Amino acid sequence: MNTVLFVDDEAHILELMKMHFSKKYKVFTAKDGIEALTIFESNGVDLIVSDVKMPRMNGMDLLKKVKEKSDVPVIMVTAFGSIEDAVDAIKMGAYDYISKPVNLRDLEMKIERALDYLSVKRENFELKTRVRKTSTSGIVTVNEKMMEILNKIPEYAKKDLPVLILGESGTGKELIAKEIHAQSERYLKPFIAVNVSAIPEDLFESEFFGYEKGAFTGANNQKIGKFEAANKGTLFLDEIGDMRLDHQVKLLRVLQDSKITRLGSVKEIPLDFRLICATNKPLSEMIKNGTFRQDLYYRINVIRIEIPPLRERPEDVEAIALHYLREYSRKFSEEEKTISPQALNVLKSYSWPGNVRELENVILRAMINSTSNEIKVRDLPDEIVENHDYMDYQTFLVKKKIEKEKLYRELQKKFVRQLLRKTGGNVSKAAELAKMDRRLLQNMIKEVNSWQSKI
């Protein structure tokens, strides 16, 4: 049985509420916000129905204090016609409001809806704490090799061992790492992702080990490092192949000792995290060249996952393209688009050096360019169509348009440069020499500059 707390400074209102709702709920009553807060903190209250105007502590103050401590829904009772109170209450987090004089049937419906909302919210929370997601990664594939990788993830997740993920940029290495974490025993703890190549070399120690206040000039506050932030969870080091040799030594020491010391401190902090590394570089070759430590390689290369590039799984191109079409259609509230067979052939024949990340970008650009519910060859970026060898009539027309555009741009560049060279860069004189409107020439110059900035 759910517990409902009614708060009102009028005794007869509280008595009425108790008589009407006691058959269905366990009812508490309070004559002001202070008494209500005491009952709320000492009893398991599922819902609060509170008047706004009360002595000592009013309903708004009660609402604020309840929301600071709990997600228990609150229904506010406002004076007739006081829409300002109702709006303020909703902004402060009230679930709903009802105006005086209170219609008991309406209030009953609002209470039922609020308790249903609370029930669903609690069920979702319990689900998050009990059940691991089986598809947190968002990886879309119909490729046999990729399916094998995904099917092995539960097995990899159970073994609390280091993982090395190999694959080109944009293949989804971080998504695989997140999926392993989500299905592991550490799933409720942090997943800390670090792009090693993005951290300046001189900030490695402060970023990874953290520091105490006053450890160096500019250390105005204590900072927790990446190692410590990942404690009890998973640390994902992307682009591990870009780590400097001296930094590799420090990482190896942390893995061996399972403890760190913040900069400016002598206190050792014990650590327990799972390490997942990823790279697009050939580490075995780097070991031969002396740019990657062999002992660190053995440490991180326990479970090894190799993700094939998109060009080796052309069957995934259509599945991924359709996935992003659906996703962006929902995001932009548009009718879902399809892809013409000719456009799909162009996508499948492309080598995708940027892999899934590049395909996502191409689909988004095509959606923006498209004026119908079907993505056609003409909607695809020029660089994709230009690399397409297979020729059908539609592709031919698009390529023809691209070549014309190229020729036009070259002619315009030559025309603008010659004019400006002859007039020493004076736009007014150049327009006069060309017998054309000055604004038209300015627009042409802007176009030429914009083309050059994109090169």
Image: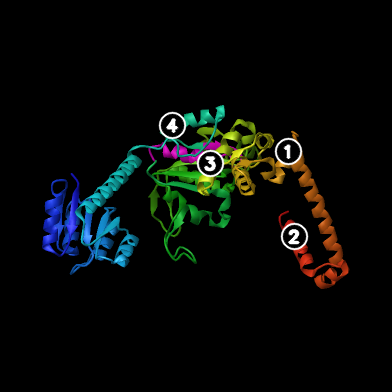
Mark 2 or mark 1: whose residue is earlier in sequence: 1
Based on the picture, tell me whether residue 274 belongs to the magenta stretch. no
Could you classify mark 2 by the number of other residues whose Cα lies within 10 Å: few (under 14), some (14-19), or many (20 or more)? some
Mark 3 or mark 1: whose residue is earlier in sequence: 3
In this picture, residue 334 sits left or right of residue 73: right
Element class at badge 3: helix
Mark 1 or mark 4: whose residue is earlier in sequence: 4
Above or below — where is 162 with respect to 425? above
The residue indicated by pointer 3 is 326
Q: Can residue 111 be seen from the camera position used here?
A: yes
* Mark seen at residue 329: none
Element class at badge 2: helix
Quadrant of residue 262 within the rendered picture: bottom left
Are the residues tagged 3 and 1 within 8 Å (C-beta)?
A: no
Residue toward you, 208 or 47: 47
In this picture, residue 120 sits left or right of residue 256: left
Residue 208 picture location, percent across and down:
48, 52
* Mark seen at residue 447: 2
The residue indicated by pointer 4 is 154
Residue plotted at (88% across, 69% down): 433
Are the residues tagged 4 and 2 within 8 Å (C-beta)?
A: no
Q: How is the image coloured?
A: rainbow
Are the residues tagged 2 and 3 within 8 Å (C-beta)?
A: no
Residue plotted at (17% across, 62% down): 8
Q: CA distance from mark 3 to mark 4?
A: 28 Å
Based on the picture, tell me whether residue 165 belongs to the magenta stretch. yes
Kind of residue sitting beneath label 3: Arg
Above or below — where is 448 with respect to 114? below
Could you classify mark 1 by the number of other residues whose Cα lies within 10 Å: few (under 14), some (14-19), or many (20 or more)? some
The residue indicated by pointer 1 is 394
Kind of residue sitting beneath label 4: Pro
Quadrant of residue 280 within the rendered picture: top right
